[in-house]
Amino acid sequence: RKEVEQDPGPFNVPEGATVAFNCTYSNSASQSFFWYRQDCRKEPKLLMSVYSSGNEDGRFTAQLNRASQYISLLIRDSKLSDSATYLCAVRTGGFKTIFGAGTRLFVKA
Amino acid sequence: EPEVTQTPSHQVTQMGQEVILRCVPISNHLYFYWYRQILGQKVEFLVSFYNNEISEKSEIFDDQFSVERPDGSNFTLKIRSTKLEDSAMYFCASSYDLGTGRETQYFGPGTRLLVL
């Protein structure tokens, strides 16, 4: 089983749609969880950290389910500018961040 | 806003040659990292560095790789004898550890390395 696994994608959605990404992780000792956004040929940029209680930042909502070892990201009211690859990332103690392969999102007008 | 910088942005080298990739982390950060991303694949952790020593490394980070903080601002990744499979984007990152494990790692724009 892969350490961090994401929905295969790509997701093609119209502007204004709500889209959800899922991510599972294999190590139950994982402690920190993140969603990054990566534009083509650019560096990953932190979108949000994911806390046990769930957290929201504008149109973005992240959830963590430790029992199921599952993280989700919900994007509401999609914009053209949301088109990117979304990376799930997990840290298990230490400083090694393990990234998923990413899910590509295309938002079309 | 402070940012991580990397040089060069692109590097082309011959197989077997040594390359040094350079990074300037954010000035008050204490932890430094290198990641790589082979084209079309996921971002992979290589190494973390704190207090002038490696704190963690992956199985990718073999004897061909080394890191150094030669002065107060630069952080370098050296690949001694490059192989074709070293062709990738190399990202440097830094963080200021607050001890929570949730600290944000800020990534530089990357160096695209092509080994011929």
Image (spheres, coloured by chain):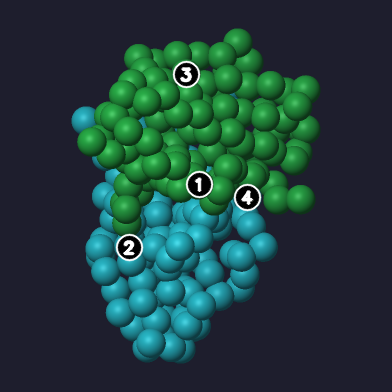
Q: Is residue B74 visible?
A: no
The three-letter code of the residue at mark 2 reads Thr
Judged by depth in the image, the label closer to the viewer, 1 or 4, is 1
Q: CA distance from mark 4 to mark 3?
A: 31 Å
Does label 3 lie on the same chain as label 4?
no
For disc 4, the marked residue is B56
Judged by depth in the image, the label closer to the viewer, 4 or 3, is 3
Q: CA distance from mark 2 to mark 4?
A: 22 Å
Q: Chain of mark 1?
A: A
Does label 2 lie on the same chain as label 3?
no
Judged by depth in the image, the label closer to the viewer, 1 or 2, is 1
Direction from residue B69 to residue B102 in the image, left or right: right
The three-letter code of the residue at mark 1 reads Gly
Judged by depth in the image, the label closer to the viewer, 1 or 3, is 1
Q: Chain B colour? A: cyan
Q: Chain of mark 3?
A: A
Q: CA distance from mark 1 to mark 3?
A: 19 Å
Q: CA distance from mark 3 to mark 2?
A: 32 Å
Q: Secondary structure at mark 3?
A: strand
For disc 2, the marked residue is B111
The quarter of the picture where the N terminus of chain B appears is top left
Instruction: Identify whether A59 is placed above or below B63.
Output: above
Q: CA distance from mark 1 to mark 2?
A: 27 Å
Does label 4 lie on the same chain as label 2?
yes
Residue shown at 32%/47% (left/top)? Answer: A39
Q: Chain A colour? A: green
Residue shown at 40%/30% (left/top)? Answer: A47
Instruction: Say which of A53 and B90 sits in front.
Output: A53
The three-letter code of the residue at mark 3 reads Thr
